[in-house]
Image (cartoon, rainbow, N blue to C red):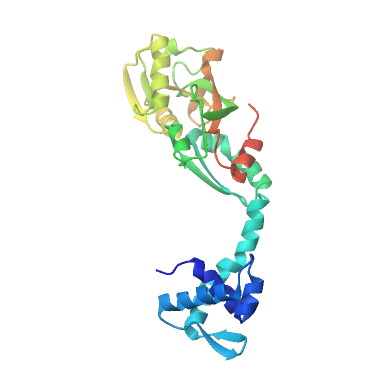
Amino acid sequence: MIQISRLEGFFWVARTGGYARAARAFPYPISQPAVHQQVRKLERELETPLFERVAKDRVRLTPAGRHLFDFVAPFYEGLPAVERSIRGAEHGGEIHIHAASLLLRDLLPAWVKRLKRKCPQAEIHLREAQELDPALLRRGEADLLISHMPDLPDDIASRRVGTLHGYVVVPRGHRLARRKRISLRDLAGETFIGYSPELMIARLQMHALAEAGVEPARTISAGTAQTILAFVEAGLGVSAFATVDPAGPRRQGVVALRLRGKRFDFPIHMAWRKHAPANPALEAALATAPAP
């Protein structure tokens, strides 16, 4: 295997055309014999000459040397600019954001637009996820989690970015559709369309129904809010879930009835690792986050 450190001497000799000139061009102090040794050892590793001498103090690349130079030159030529960018925090960074599908659709578009204006070079990766475990942040799989997260460990920072509003949704022709006020008790005996049982949000749904003393006649499970709404629109049952839009979910054939009371408003938080390495993209996301 080539020792990467020897490529630097090779690059500067090829760039300047001589060993003495290469030593003077190096970004740090080095002697001409040291540069010569780097090249000689590299040639021995590759078992082929990389330069031929054309004058007392001048060399030129052999065909093998030209092939190697074309490969390594972009790295060494671009390195000073990358160093300046990192030192000046000018690089955009990269951010992985995990959020539920509901929030990706209703909360993230305007937020990401602001983020891109503030940090145009940022690489942004969005992932739909229903279960958001702080361990994702610790493992580096996510930089930012966005969800209703009532309990977070001490090593995770958080800030409120919005509210989920509780609604009952029924088919347009349902007996409850004309109600001015509604409670979860009104769903007793109905077929309930909820989230898939393995999701945390499904457990919250069933807990709320149990607190209201409601036991559905039967249940149908769905993975996303849009699927639940489609099933309700088809007349397969009713549901209760939370949405970012204060006006409630909007879908033809579905009536949304607001559940009144603070216990049906759920804070949305963004969470990130307190001692994460500096990341311009994450800093831009925090700076452009919506006000709650």
Residue 165 % position (x, y): 54, 22
Please give left or right for residue 181 compared with residue 193 in the image.
Answer: right
Relative to 104, residue 88 above or below:
below
Residue 238 in the image, given as x and y percentages of width and height: 41, 22
Residue placed at 55% from the left, 27% from the top? 268
In the depicted structure, whether residue 16 falls above or below residue 219: below
Residue 81 placed where, x, y %?
65, 61
Residue 81 visible, this angle = yes
> Residue at the left extreme?
218
Left or right relative to 185: residue 16:
right
Q: Nearer the viewer, residue 72 or 211?
A: 72
Q: How many marks?
A: 0
Residue at point 53% right, 12% down?
A: 181
The quarter of the picture where the N terminus appears is bottom left
Residue in the picture at 42% in, 27% down: 232
Quick one: 25 or 179, which is closer to the camera? 25
Report x, y in % for residue 176: 46, 16
Outermost residue toward the top in this view: 213
Q: On screen, 41 above or below 182?
A: below
Among the 4 quarters of the image, the one containing residue 11: bottom right
In front here: 119 or 61?
A: 61
Q: Residue at x 66, y 73 (%)?
A: 24
